[in-house]
Image: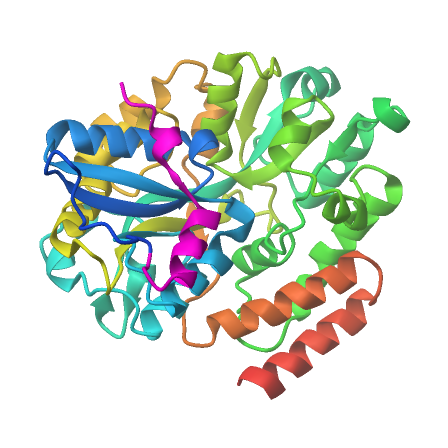
Amino acid sequence: MRKIPARALTAAVAVSLLAAGCGGGGSDSGTTSDGRTVVKVALWNYDTTPEFKALIEGFEAENPKIDVQPVDILADDYADKVTTMLAGGDSTDVLTMKNVTDYSRYATRGQLKSLDSQVEALDKASYSGLDPFELDGHYYALPYRHDFWVLFYNKALVKPTGADLSNLSWADFASLAKEITKGKGTDKVYGTHFQTWRSPVQAIAAAQTGGDQLGGDYGFFKDQYELALDLQKSGAMMPFGTAKSQQVHYKTVFESGKVGMVPMGSWLAAALLEDKAKGVTDVDWGIAPMPQIKADGKTTTFGSPTAFAVNKKAKNPSAAEKFVEWASGPKGAAAIAKVGVVPAYTGDEVQKAYFAVKGMPSDELAAKAMKPDAVNLEMPVSDKTADVNQILDEEHELVMTGERSVEKGIEEMNKRVKSEVQ
């Protein structure tokens, strides 16, 4: 078996090629020395994101005349690097769309190849997460996975409390987080951890109240901000400033047993399964539905599909399209379900493969969590999405670090979105 990580191009390499004016394909001809067509795929954290290896190896096994080469970029830098690559005329064939916000930006700039004909051929009823990629009746990416947020929990910390996680309100969640919290200094165990992204506060508020993140009126954020700040103040959650400055990662703190509960995307399951198999962690974990704002007995969460797009300047566009179609279809879905990733393509066989993964929680609580009543889009797609997203990000950081009050922060969000974007 080839050692794929060794051949992966790093972001630094990709950028250096840009500087040389050669694009991601450098000076090569787009073929290997043995005549195979090269398809370069921009992705992130190849070594710790098992879905990419599953897709590439599965595709190559069926298409031996195509050599898929990952262009590996750090996850935190991915959007900025791809933006720079595209602006410089890079010819990397396939671009992974980490979220629909970035997709909207690249597509509206005319940097992606149309995939309308491929979408017309799909059985759309079998796909979740396809709609967000429609822009004015056209598609420029095909989703291959559709993650949504659930509540990961450490059984050793949560079970002794006797808490029922099947239908938590956010108030229940906060009380439980405070109950679990214990210790000091290096022995500190936090009840919960919110990654420093704005989504654990803003996107969940929008999903569960029906608030519009593009609308310019953000009063619906208020209760979730007060909850998050109270968790920080009580010591049940690491302060935002500490988490940000120390670049604390949700997976690391959860796997180390230093956190009882982590609201996070379903993608975390695959990483936990892989790390447990490697002996990196021995945490006994489970999955529960996201806590709810409304007490209507339904589970509403948010999510975002992940997709592949073909660079409009791809060196080998036909082979790139072939990879994108395969990855987003039934065969690609089966490949990633076997490593614990939720595919965009759905079907009984795919579901069976997902829950059959060794170590995957398969109890009633996990089954309920993986079948929410509604999954709303993490962020609506429009030509204003990227600009609104930036403003909400900036104001989120100021509120969570205490530099603005919740009221002042929301006031600034309202004012800035209306004056700078709308």
Looking at the image, which residue sits at the far right?
184
Q: Can residue 13 be found in the magenta stretch?
A: yes
Q: Determine the image quadrant of residue 169.
A: top right
Q: In this view, does 202 lie to the left or right of 311?
A: right
Q: Is residue 256 left or right of residue 149?
A: right
Name the residue nearer the viewer: 182 or 205: 182
User: How is the structure coloured here?
Assistant: rainbow
- Residue 163: x and y in percent read 69, 25
Q: Residue at x 27, y 65 (%)?
A: 112
When the figure is inspected, residue 359 is found, relative to residue 9, above or below; the finding is: above
Name the residue nearer the viewer: 177 or 2: 2
**Residue 348 visible within the image:** no
Q: Residue at x 35, y 64 (%)?
A: 21
- Residue 325: x and y in percent read 17, 46
- Residue 61: x and y in percent read 16, 27
Q: Can residue 403 be found in the magenta stretch?
A: no
When the figure is inspected, residue 121 is found, relative to residue 418, above or below; the finding is: above
Name the residue nearer the viewer: 73 or 208: 73
Q: Residue at x 77, y 62 (%)?
A: 399
Q: Is residue 363 left or right of residue 353?
A: right
Quadrant that contains the N terminus: top left
Name the residue nearer the viewer: 93 or 138: 93
**Residue 326 visible within the image:** yes
Q: Residue at x 50, y 14 (%)?
A: 278
Residues in magenta? 1-23
Q: Determine the image quadrant of residue 202.
A: bottom right
